[in-house]
Image: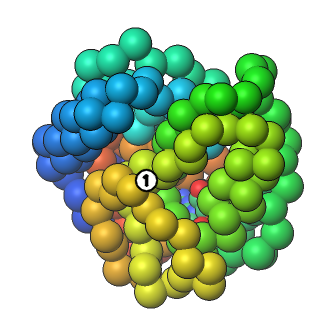
Amino acid sequence: MFDPANVSILIPADKISERVAALGEQITADYKADERVPHLICVLKGGCMFLSDLMRSVHLPVTIDFIAVSSYGTETASSGEVRMTKDLDQSLEGRDVLFVEDIVDTGLTLSYLTDTFRRRGARSVKIAALLSKPARRKVEVPIDYVGFEIPDEFVVGYGLDHAERFRNLPFIGVVTDPAAV
Ligand code: 5GP
């Protein structure tokens, strides 16, 4: 396994799989109870691994789509700016949107996306985030399904990058020496 020396493990791979499976069960039960089927919208690129694991744990005929936004560049502090760099392929009219996001940090990205998607005619909009950093929140966004709350650290792995690297790590880790990256 690729296990770089300058990344320390915060959440090991087996804990992630357990939690993602539990989230999938919860989502299945909730949407079944409401007689709805979620339209999973993965926020690229960070949400890719979470989507691929989560969708296999949701036992409903889900549909998926992808959106890309940019708010970070290669920096490790939020610019507060949200720009859509790839829009959806399908219409949202009457859909039950479930965002699949890697991490909610300031909340600016999801607050912007949930407002935009409601205006586009989605019937319901919910959020599943693998990670949440509550200490950094600038805008309150209700996260319906959260994997783990983490401290205010810049994390990588399981889809999350630092300057486009580390996305393929199967665990969530903290870069111990950003200068060495
Ligand atoms: P927000 O708009 O909530 O501040 O930021 C959301 C986006 O910022 C995430 O989707 C992610 O791309 C990026 N981000 C926030 N915190 C981290 C972090 O600790 N590590 C990485 N790699 N990206 C982060």
Q: Nearer the viewer, residue 51 or 7?
A: 51
Q: Where is residue 168 drawn, in percent x and y?
A: 44, 37
- What residue is pinned by disc 1? 129
Residue found 43% across the figure and 80% down from its top? 134
Q: Where is residue 57 drawn, in percent x and y?
A: 26, 26
Residue sitting at the far front: 34
Residue 52 against residue 132 in the figure, above or below: above
Q: Nearer the viewer, residue 152 or 26?
A: 26
Q: Nearer the viewer, residue 166 or 117?
A: 117
User: Is residue 23 at least partly visible in the picture?
Assistant: yes
Q: Secondary structure at mark 1?
A: strand
> In the rendered view, does 121 fall on the left or right side of 150?
right
> In the rendered view, does 37 fall on the left or right side of 63?
left
Amino acid residing under circle 1? Ala
Residue sitting at the far top: 61
Residue 51 against residue 127 in the figure, above or below: above
Q: Where is residue 22 drawn, in percent x and y?
A: 17, 41
* Label 1 CB-ligand 1 distance < 8 A: no
Residue found 65% across the figure and 29% down from its top? 94
Residue found 49% across the figure and 59% down from its top? 103
Q: Where is residue 177 drawn, in percent x and y?
A: 46, 73
Q: Quadrant of residue 25?
A: top left
Q: Which class describes the residues within 10 Å of circle 1: few (<14), some (14-19), or many (20+)?
A: many
The colouring scheme, among rainbow, by chain, secondary structure or one colour, is rainbow
Q: Nearer the viewer, residue 130 or 63?
A: 63
Residue 133 against residue 130 in the figure, above or below: below
